[in-house]
Amino acid sequence: MKRVTLVVSVLLVLGLLAGCGGGGSGTSNGGNNGAPAPVAPATATQFLYVSDTNGELFGFSVDANSGVLSPIRSGNPMDVVGGGFGGVVRIASDPNGNNLYVARAALDKGDNLMVLFLMPDGSGNLGTWSDLGQALTIPPGKLAVDPSSKNLYVIPDPSANLNEILSFSIAPGSPHSPHLVALSTPTTGVPGVPPGITVDPSGHYVYVTFAGAPGMQIAGYSRDQTTGALTNLPSSPFGNTGGNDSQEIRITPSGTFAAVANAATNDVSIMSLNTGTLTNISGSPFPAGASPLSVAIDPSSKFVFVANQGDNTLSAYAMGPDGGLTAISGSPFTVGSQPQGVTVDLSGKFAYVASADGNVWGFTLNTGTDSLTPITGSPFHANGTLRDIVVLKP
């Protein structure tokens, strides 16, 4: 396993996101042509953020009744640290939707950065804890946060060809100045290069998908509740019969099942979770679209969504008590070019997909009829080549 040296000196973050103004490549939703973005509606109780490959974030308020997205008051886009450095931005939230964790893989500066942003008010504007920046010597990939927000786990971007997990503690510091600290053992080995990572809802286990032999591409680790350190589970890696080129993995909020997108076999695996061990359920894997890339599960653990990069669709399923998946009527649903990320809002009423063509596609989920319908005005325009998507609450 290749090892890297973390630069643990803390960076000074270059300004607040609010009012950054971005790198000049983005536009507001709905073709505002430079006009001030509308104020978040009074019914907005959540905010949606989506990242791109040009060092930017786009923020929207979520109308609680309709799911309609409106650019936040400060406008779009927002540079991650100012200066228009560019680079792929990866984002994740803690399970409670309170804070936004951001990593930027620099393209031309060599200064890969991680930083934690929070929302200081109800407008959706993001501020920063100014001493939280963490420099890395590798391009960061996807992120995962434990339920208690004590630890941040980062996998390298697959382009780095590194088979490891980077581990950090989120130190409280002063009341308004927490910061990232690398664990005493900052890297944990993975059997292959990992494209996906998640922490289970109990915080006891961390799982990654990795490039390896078909059907054996999921590794699991027990997590020390005090230190955040990771230890290989004895039964890892887990057998995922029928799945190949596993990408994103997500655990149901109930902690009962894992959903895994398998890009090469065009399907999604459902695995039961028992004391850390993952086992395929009967009937798994279930058919998806072409080259499924990302997965989301609603807060009730009753619906699963899979973004299919290969045929520009969203597969939607109802999940039974045994974990079995049944396609929702009308699934798969057409979305934009090369969908990259999918999420469900914290109320479980809306599903959103970020596509590489710069749009966010929204759907209303009717849990009574197991149906999915497009939100009025969808798709909502951001810009650039979009990647990750999350929903937070004020």
Image: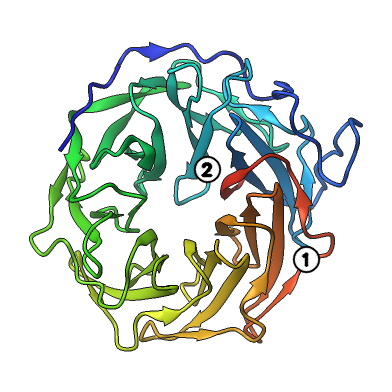
Relative vertical location of residue 44 with respect to residue 135 in this rendering, above or below: below
Residue toward you, 40 or 322: 322
For residue 373, what is the image quadrant? bottom right
The front one of 159 and 206 is: 159
Q: Secondary structure at mark 2?
A: loop
Quarter of the image with the C terminus is top right
**Quadrant (top left/top right/bottom left/bottom right) for the N terminus:** top left
Q: Position of residue 132 (x, y in %)?
A: 43, 21
| Circle 2 Cα neighbour tier, 10 Å, few/some/many (<14 / 14–19 / ≥20) | some
Q: Is residue 156 left or right of residue 133?
A: left
> Closer to us: mark 2 or mark 1?
1
Q: Which mark is residue 375?
A: 1
Dot 1 lies on which element?
loop
Q: Residue at x 77, y 63 (%)?
A: 65
Q: Quadrant of residue 21?
A: top right
Q: Earlier in the sequence, mark 2 or mark 1?
A: 2
List x then y, in percent, for residue 203: 29, 53
List the single residue furthest toward the left. 234
Amino acid type shown at disc 1: Ile
Mark 2 touches mark 1? (CB < 8 Å): no
Residue 98 is marked as: 2
Q: Amino acid at mark 2?
A: Asn
Q: Position of residue 338 (x, y in %)?
A: 60, 57
Q: How far, Cα to Cα, is label 2 from label 1?
A: 25 Å
Q: Nearer the viewer, residue 267 or 136?
A: 267
